[in-house]
Amino acid sequence: MRGTILYAPGDIRVEDRPDPVIKEPTDAIIRTVATCVCGSDLWPYRGIDEVAEPRAIGHEYVGIVEEIGSEVTGLRAGQFVVGGFYASDGTCPHCRAGFQFSCMNHAGFDGCQSAYIRIPQADGTLFATPEQPDDDLIPSLLALSDVMSTGWHAAVTSGVRPGSTVAVVGDGAVGLSAVLAARELGAARIIAMSRHASRQRIATEFGATDIVAERGDDGVTAVLELTEGIGADAVCEAVGTAESMTQAVRSVRPGGLVGVVGVPHDVELPVSQMFFRNVGIKGGPASVPQYLPELLDKVLQRGISPGRVFDLELPLEQAADAYAAMDERRAIKALLRP
Ligand SMILES: [Zn+2]
């Protein structure tokens, strides 16, 4: 089969790879319908995360079940499925508590930018749609595999509730998804922090009521001015840098929560400042299986269109162009079709 391999920073190639096979009785093999490039794939692509040796990459997918292992009971061949960016069994204490990323049988997978994918713990990881979805829904279903579920996690962990004032730091696909999640959870006011016109447009379409283009001190000042000096009730942090975290912590009101979903890179928390303002941090890798049933329903009912974050679609063979476009910020997020 064809699939991407990251050889070194900036060097991504599509080449022949072995077809995946069932290794454990809890596995399933899916035929990929669509996959995509994640902001987190750009960390190794840019050389910020080390690339010690060539490796398969990609962790977002929707597809058709091709084959199931002997212990898979909830799926059958031919079903259209979406699953999260890691595998979880759905039955262990952490899964039952709603923190599936910490599953006692957690398995990460890289290599989903390929024609076929082996999914471990298929019963806990994959969710089937009732029937084959219309083709125009594919981008929104694919968004549930990571970015929309991650944006939802930011909104949930920051405590967004009906009537909340929410600030979202980060205007990538996850930040935009957090805006959409905040709207769905009933936020009254959503401040999107974005400097890019195309991203501001999608933020507004997703429910942002205010746009703040400033960053750093000026960004914090702008949020305080918009909230009569109080700060946001909830802040979603979807970047993961020291600068974005500082901005998030300073933009939340005393007693508020920051929901962090940007993978931290060299971030140190200002614990004293947080202590004296009663500010808390929650968040982490998204509880995708926790949210998928509700989000699938919203997409299939056409209540939300998180697939709007895909502004580039290419054949899998042109994955290198997709990475370059995202790296150079010519695209928000690129969808790939085998
Ligand atoms: Zn588990």
Image: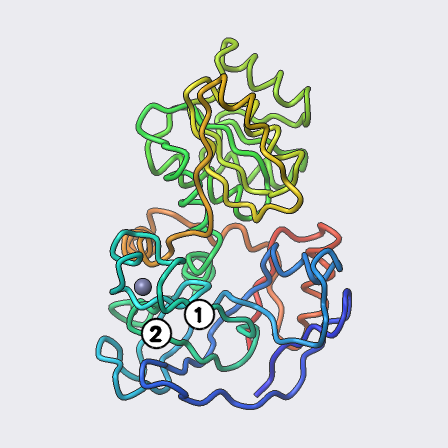
x 30%, y 84%: residue: 77
| Quadrant of image for the N terminus | bottom right
Circle 1: is it few (<14), some (14-19), or many (20+) Cα within 10 Å? some
Write the residue at 72% across / 71% down. 52
In the drawing, does residue 321 fall left or right of residue 16?
Answer: right
Query: Helix, strand or loop at disc 2?
Result: loop
Q: Position of residue 127 (x, y in %)?
A: 31, 67
Would you place residue 147 above or below residue 181 in this image? below
- Disc 2 residue type? Gln
Query: How many numbered circles are shown?
Result: 2
Closer to the camera, 168 or 246?
246
| Residue 57 drawn at (x, y percent) | 60, 71
Q: Which residue, as the protein is rendered here, is positioned at the far top?
A: 228
Q: What residue is pinned by disc 1?
A: 107
Quadrant of the image containing the C terminus:
bottom right
**In which image quadrant can residue 184 be found?**
top left
Q: Which mark is drawn over residue 121?
A: 2
SS at circle 1: strand
